[in-house]
């Protein structure tokens, strides 16, 4: 009979790690006596990162004594204390390849239900003093699992564990974990896992995303968006056939190929990277710009606002029709998704460019399009509104369309009802007044503060976060779970002597620097430069760090558990083997 060997709890505390402060409750310690199991956790227990741990579906973590003995053999060390894997219950029995998601167990006075496998997290590597641990738990099929509390009650060491119900799908924790993280994703097993009513919502969404990848594109759609292979590697030379003044501050470049292969239509919302000469004759400058059309007649249009940056200054001052430019293939995950759900295209300022490409795509579908389309755009006034007549024409080609233009500071010559609809900044209240349905898919692009406020507002009024798709010009927001926030710093060369290796270019951060072998990965190099990054496991499992590799070659010191999407790299375990260009 399975039984509880140890009950372990711990509260969040600050831990020093690699010069940073980590807030974590991974240090669980055995407790004597009986403990109350409540809906969100055990009494005396807590979580340092509620995004990845804790909550109704991850209230209690379970790990097995047999796995302790297994890891002692693999790691060649003694594991002298229970709770070392961050578990609340150390148990004899309940193996990951026997327990199923949806199983219910009576332990002491409480009733529990298995909700999902463990979430991969770097903090278990800190606790175990083994950075590979998140990957090892997955690849060795010994992740452990979470319980939700169905009936609250007291539990303690020595309590028998009695299974009272089997999960409907009959899928073990080990299989469900491998189905998401490991390379093989059989459709029939995905469907079965997604149908298990007890599986937590986040894992269901991941399996739904894997099932939606009907084209079988490389990568793991359950962990990060997948993309079709890039049309060409690195950069190729395109010709500027025209330069168009779209407004007082915006110019468009129309680019064509002068030799085969000619330019294929990009996914609506894609971006390209332009490689531009440096003003001082130094290293080339790379900048990302959205494609504002859908490649009609083999022509890509990029539209650039005049600004203080080196790239926009060069384009506005030096680029003319007939010039040749180095251009990457179209890339990006902010692209219009197929389906029948209503589409809401929301933008402000130059953020109009990717959603304008989406509007072109919707208009190209013509009267056959069944989707309702909402076009919502904000500008300071008419002088700073590009593409006004083009947008009117495209909206006129759609059978089910709603449009609203907001000017925050209209001029005297801007006429309400003719040039704009409301004198305000776009907000969630603006969108509510239009009666946008709850199942709508939002595509949002604009200044950082605009995006942040709008995302918060839309979530507050009930729109699902999974329906809010965003594009950010410049560096994307970082994800560094549990790391205490420090002073904000602009990207910069790392401290210490310059490296002697290949050049690593961070295109969104306007930084190009030689690689140094004193860093273990591209992730560590980016962190040393204060380039905003996203990560969670730091061991090639979770794909949070997956980044577009625009140009160049990398190598993995430790092969990731699953390969990233085509044209992308997991920076947590990669190094450059040539000059590279990263979308960071």
Image: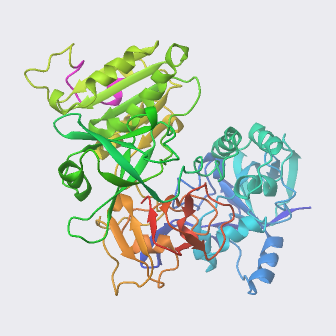
Left or right of 191: which side holds 436?
left
Q: Residue at x 38, y 14 (%)?
A: 396
Choose between 134 and 211: the one closer to the eye: 211
Residue 526 percent across, percent down from the top left = 42, 70
Quadrant occupied by the N terminus: bottom right
Question: Which residue is pictured at 32% across the width and 66% down the height?
Answer: 284
In magenta, the rendered stretch is 420-431
Give the quarter of the figure containing the C terminus. bottom left
Q: Is residue 16 above or below residue 338?
A: below
Whether the magenta-drawn stretch holds residue 424 is answered as yes
Q: Nearer the viewer, residue 121 or 339?
A: 339
Q: Nearer the viewer, residue 448 or 236?
A: 236
| Residue located 44% across and 64% down the image | 581
Picture coordinates of residue 78 (x, y %)?
Answer: 74, 86
The residue most toward the right is 1
Q: Is residue 20 toward the left or the right of residue 418 in the image?
A: right
Task: Kindly tell me whether residue 152 is visible in this rendering.
Answer: no
> In the drawing, does residue 62 fall left or right of residue 119?
right
- Using residue 388 as the reference point, say whether residue 433 is left or right of it: right
Please say whether residue 307 is visible from this viewpoint: yes
Q: Position of residue 146 (x, y in %)?
A: 70, 55
Q: Residue at x 45, y 62 (%)?
A: 582
Rendered image coloring scheme: rainbow
Residue 235 in which image quadrant: bottom left
- Reply above or below: 86 against 307: below
| Residue 130 position (above or below residue 346) | below
Residue 257 among those drawn in magenta:
no
Q: Nearer the viewer, residue 299 or 502?
A: 299
């Amino acid at each position: 009979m399975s039984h509880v060997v140890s009950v372990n709890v711990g509260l969040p505390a600050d831990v020093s790690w690699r010069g940073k402060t980590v807030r974590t409750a991974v240090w669980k310690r055995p407790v004597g006596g009986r403990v109350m199991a409540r809906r969100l956790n055990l009494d005396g227990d807590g979580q340092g990162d509620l995004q990845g741990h804790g909550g109704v579906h991850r209230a209690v973590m379970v790990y097995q004594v047999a796995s302790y003995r297994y890891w002692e053999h693999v790691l060649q060390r003694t594991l002298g204390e229970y709770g070392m894997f961050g578990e609340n219950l150390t148990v004899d029995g309940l193996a990951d390849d026997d327990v199923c998601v949806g199983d219910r167990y009576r332990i002491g006075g409480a009733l529990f239900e298995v909700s999902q496998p463990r979430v991969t997290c770097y903090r278990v590597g800190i606790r175990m003093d083994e950075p590979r641990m998140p990957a090892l738990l997955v690849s060795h099929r010994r992740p452990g699992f979470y319980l939700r509390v169905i009936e609250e009650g007291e539990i303690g060491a020595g309590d028998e564990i009695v299974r009272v119900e089997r999960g409907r799908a009959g899928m073990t924790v080990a299989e469900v974990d491998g189905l998401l993280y490991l390379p093989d994703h059989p459709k029939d097993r995905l469907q079965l896992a997604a149908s298990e009513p007890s599986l937590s919502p986040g894992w269901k969404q991941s399996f739904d995303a894997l099932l939606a990848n009907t084209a079988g594109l490389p990568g793991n759609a359950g962990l990060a968006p997948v993309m079709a292979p890039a049309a060409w590697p690195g950069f190729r030379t395109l010709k500027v056939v025209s330069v168009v003044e779209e407004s007082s501050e915006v110019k468009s470049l129309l680019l064509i190929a002068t030799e085969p292969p000619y330019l294929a239509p990009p996914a609506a919302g894609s971006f390209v990277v332009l490689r531009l000469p440096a003003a001082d004759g130094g290293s080339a400058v790379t900048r990302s710009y959205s494609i504002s059309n859908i490649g009609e007649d083999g022509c890509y249009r990029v539209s650039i606002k005049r600004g203080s940056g080196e790239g926009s200054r060069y384009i506005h001052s030096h680029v003319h029709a007939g010039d040749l430019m180095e251009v990457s293939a179209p890339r990006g995950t902010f692209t219009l998704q197929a389906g029948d759900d209503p589409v809401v295209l929301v933008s402000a300022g130059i953020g109009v460019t990717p959603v304008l490409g989406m509007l072109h795509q919707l208009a190209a579908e013509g009267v056959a399009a069944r989707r309702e389309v909402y076009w919502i755009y904000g500008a300071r006034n008419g002088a700073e509104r590009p593409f006004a007549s083009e947008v009117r024409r495209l909206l006129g080609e759609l059978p089910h369309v709603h449009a609203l233009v907001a000017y925050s500071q209209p001029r005297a010559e801007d006429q309400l009802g003719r040039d704009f609809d409301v004198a305000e900044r776009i907000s969630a209240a603006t969108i509510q007044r239009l009666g946008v349905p709850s199942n709508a898919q939002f595509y949002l692009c604009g200044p950082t503060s605009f995006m942040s406020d709008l995302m918060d507002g839309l979530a507050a009024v009930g729109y699902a976060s999974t329906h809010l798709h965003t594009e950010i010009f410049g560096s994307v927001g970082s994800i560094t779970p549990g790391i205490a926030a420090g002073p904000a710093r602009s990207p910069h060369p790392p401290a210490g002597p310059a490296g002697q290796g290949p050049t690593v270019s961070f295109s969104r951060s306007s930084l190009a620097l030689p690689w140094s072998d004193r860093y273990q990965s591209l992730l560590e190099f980016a962190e040393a430069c204060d380039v905003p990054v996203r990560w969670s496991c730091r061991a090639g499992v979770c794909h949070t760090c997956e980044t577009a590799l625009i140009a160049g070659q990398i190598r993995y010191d430790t092969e990731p558990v699953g390969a990233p999407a085509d044209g992308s790299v997991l920076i947590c375990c990669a190094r450059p083997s040539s000059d590279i260009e990263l979308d960071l």
